[in-house]
Image: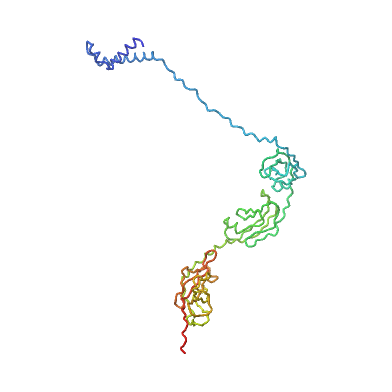
Amino acid sequence: MSKKFLTKLLALTLCAGLVLQPVTAFADTPVESETTEVVAEEVTDEVTEEIKEEVPEVKEELPEEVTPLETEAEEVKPMDNSSLPVLKAWIDDGWLYIDSIGDDYFYDIVVDNGAITTSNIPYNLNKYCNEIGLASGSYKVTVQALKKHTYEISSQTAELTYDFVADDIVLRPLTNVKIEEDILTFDAYAENCLYFVKVDGHDPIIATTNRVDLIYNFSSMGFTPGKYMLHITATKQNFKPISQTYDIEYAYAMEPEPEPEPKIVILKEDSISSNIKNMEIKYGKLCETPTFNSSYSQLEYTFAGWEEYSDEYDPEYPDGFRPCKGFFEGKYRAVLKVRIRDGYGNYELDPFFKLYVNGIGWRCIVTSYDENFNMTSMTFASPTYDIETPELPEP
């Protein structure tokens, strides 16, 4: 830096009061504060100008504007089928002919907006155009071979032109139209046709077969019960009519609400009467069949016989009681089976059903179930009868 600049910088420092003490020691007269302010302003301006002269101006170089790279979208190139076999095809009198390239191929045929894949060659193109409802005119037809199972394109595309003349449609009537048990039926009209069942003021029912479930359709479409006139017409796939309209009246009645299932009644006990109390159950007597009477008509009682107890183990009779025909010395019991009669499906026996015969409780010994684990019957045994050998009279 120059000597002049340093001198000015020193004066500025003195005015700011940074080194006032050394300066006042050599001053002859006191320094007035007002004078100091003026000098400071003048010196500050000069120093500022000097600094501007000494310090070179730095220009900020702005970076060049960066623009994003534009990536061109990759063009989707059409599939190159030039290496595939050329498919030879031609149309003659409404029939499409193709020189076969093998047995393992289908042929994809496109006419206007209609397309079909078939292996039946020659193909009746005239019939197909009539079925899809094309008007008379010239149409582009494309044909391609497809590999069976994989549907892989297996040939170049053959392009043809077909001058189609639509058949004159004779509107025939529908036949054998009838409604039985809410089912509308009629004779099939034509192959691959549709059937419109129109109802005044409502959307039509579109059927693909000659059998229409009216109760289902009317219910799902929100019809109210009443009489309706049905207008039935056969159409092509494009809904163009191909038959006369047949009118038939239908009386629609909504399906009744299913009746609620009857409430299940659980029978917990029964007290029955029997003539068993009047029977002679004595040594040497034959077993008799007692009768039983219940106040429940829903219950069916079946006497299962008399049983005698034996100490000898028999796996068929694990509790020791086995059937008998007469009474001798030993222990005996009567066995009675109970079940719900047929026709009383809303009745059930309680698993802990109690049975009283002439006021005496009998014990449940067997509970039977069907394959669905529904109880079918319960078997009860009477209290045991102890029979002793009578004493012989003294001679």
Q: Name which residue lies at 68% across and 53% down.
A: 234
Q: Name which residue lies at 50% across and 22% down.
A: 64
Residue farthest toward the right in the current orientation of the protein: 93
Q: Position of residue 70 (x, y in %)?
A: 55, 28
Q: Name which residue lies at 72% across and 55% down.
A: 172
- Quadrant in the picture for residue 256: bottom right
In the rendered image of this protein, does residue 162 appear above or below residue 320? Answer: above
Residue in front for this viewpoint, 311 or 74 = 311
In the rendered image of this protein, does residue 20 appear above or below residue 300? Answer: above
Residue in front for this viewpoint, 383 or 105 = 383
In the rendered image of this protein, does residue 86 appear above or below residue 387? Answer: above
Q: Position of residue 383 (x, y in %)?
A: 46, 76
For this view, does 24 lie left or right of residue 207?
Answer: left
Q: Position of residue 299 (x, y in %)?
A: 51, 73
In the rendered image of this protein, does residue 74 appear above or below residue 394? Answer: above
Q: Position of residue 217 (x, y in %)?
A: 60, 56
Q: Quadrant of the N terminus?
A: top left
For this view, does 359 lie left or right of residue 201?
Answer: left
Residue farthest toward the top in the current orientation of the protein: 3
Residue farthest toward the bottom in the current orientation of the protein: 395
Residue in front for this viewpoint, 268 or 10 = 268
